[in-house]
Amino acid sequence: MKDKLQSDSLSELANPTYSRVREKLREDILSGYFISGERLKIAELVERYKVSQMPIREALQQLQGEGLLIIEPNKGAHVRKVDRQFLESIYEIRQLIEVYLTVKCIENLKEKDLKSLNQIQKSYEAAASKEDYTTCLQLNRRFHSTIYELANNSEGLQILEKHWQLINTLRLTYGFGSRRTTEVIEEHRAILDALESRNPAAVEAAAAIHCVNAKADLLAQMSDKFK
Amino acid sequence: MKDKLQSDSLSELANPTYSRVREKLREDILSGYFISGERLKIAELVERYKVSQMPIREALQQLQGEGLLIIEPNKGAHVRKVDRQFLESIYEIRQLIEVYLTVKCIENLKEKDLKSLNQIQKSYEAAASKEDYTTCLQLNRRFHSTIYELANNSEGLQILEKHWQLINTLRLTYGFGSRRTTEVIEEHRAILDALESRNPAAVEAAAAIHCVNAKADLLAQMSDKFK
DNA sequence: ACAATATATATTGTATACAATCAGATAGCA
DNA sequence: TGCTATCTGATTGTATACAATATATATTGT
């Protein structure tokens, strides 16, 4: 399944060099090209990505902001360990915020919002039946973004966006479990139903289940990496 | 009270230029020198901070990672609105994570940890009675860091560190309410007692109260700014 | 007058040369 | 030997010149 997934391709387009380098570096870190904790030397990255040091330095600063590496001033950059513990810490925090925002969005939820969510869900099901997983990935993102933005919490939104960058890149490398797509449909349906009922406890439960299952599936896909 | 607070002075010491610029920029954004949403032009910042454009660009990337500004590739950087809604979103997320980590630390809490927390608490009370608020600020940080690290959740830790940078800078500008120091002593005491009892519900309540009160005090100090 | 296009200016982004800092090796000395 | 100090090479950080891009202004054609 993984071979069918295509990246958003920020890397190829006419973006600044530092953006393209950031995308490639993120992929190289998460795919395991750089080993956990490895020291990244500017000169080597200049060699690898065939650009000058300045865009590389800026990409490193951005990735530090994403938590994928640590820069010690005057010393150098080390890639963060991408191990099970790291991912679990991400998903624990993600679940806290995702559940919170999804429940909170009830306050601002209008009829038209429910309509567009249902629309996205329908498109998702269509794409899934065509096995168009690239579109599925995008629609999944739109489904959740729509909900998050209704919650009116910029800090939470920003953190979840950051996580999405990371998880998306991991999914491009490791793919999904074979049943995951249909599971996602059911879980999104459950969230939608709960939102329509406007019952906070039901929303909380549905959002939590979705997050727990997403984590379990990704970790299963990565199980060989962790051994 | 604010006049007595001193910054950690990363800005003055022999750190890279981009670190010093980052500190000053953060302060200038949070203190309101730059108005909300203002466009930051590199040339102007070069003029203001008397350094070349490269360290400024790196500082901007770092601050984007902290969520204090948004960089549009090939367009420019805009400072984020620092208004009541922004701070409320921060504190909402912060509370989620802080409570979660504090509860989770129970699992790993050893006798020696409780001892060092009590030690920090004692030092805090001593510093408070001498009205040494700079030391108080540092001890407050150590108190919470000690707890967070026991929770073993790197993502949560990182987000709280980021928040601390932000809140600390705001405190340096806007100070504390006159009773806040003694309130903090009581609230930390309550958290400590709850941790010693190893009762999750009690810990959750104590941590939540602490967070809510901190937010209320800061917003009160900043009330004139928001009006 | 208006739209589309070309031109000019301002601004961001990249490459390169050089300076500052750090880590390891070597030398000097008790 | 063990310790300190100094040098040396590797690496990070800074300044500056130049290129690419976006924005504002002017020009042209209808």
Image (tube, coloured by chain):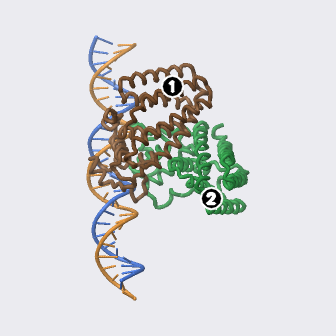
Chain colours: A green, B brown, C blue, D orange
- Which label sits in the foreground, 2 or 1? 1
Task: Determine if residue B206 is in view.
Answer: yes
Q: Could you tell me the amino acid type at mark 2?
A: Leu
Q: Residue at x 49, y 21 (%)?
A: B118
Q: Is residue C28 left or right of residue A134?
A: left
- Left or right? Give the position of C27 relative to B195: left
Question: Tag count in the figure?
Answer: 2
- Left or right: D7, with D30 as reference point: left
Q: Which element carries disc 1, helix, strand or loop?
A: helix
Residue at x 62% of width, y 49% of height: A103
**Location of residue B138 by image quarter:** top left
Residue B189: which disc? Answer: 1
Give me the chain letter of mark 1: B
Residue drawn at point x = 36 percent, y = 53 percent: B35
Q: Crowding near pointer 2: few (<14 within 10 Å), some, many (20+)?
A: some
Q: Residue at x 62, y 58 (%)?
A: A139
Judge by depth and name the residue closer to the eye, B140 or B187: B187
Residues A220 and C25: in front is: A220
Q: Position of residue B57 (x, y in %)?
A: 37, 50
Residue A9: x and y in percent read 54, 58
Look at the image and tell me whether residue B154 can be seen.
no
Residue A115 vertical position relative to residue B145 in the rendered view, above or below: below
> Tag 1: residue type?
Arg
Q: Position of residue A18 (x, y in %)?
A: 44, 52
What residue is disc 2 on?
A139
Q: In the rendering, which numbered label is found on residue B103?
A: none
Q: Position of residue B175 (x, y in %)?
A: 37, 37
Secondary-structure class at tag 2: helix
On-image quarter of the C terminus of chain A: top right
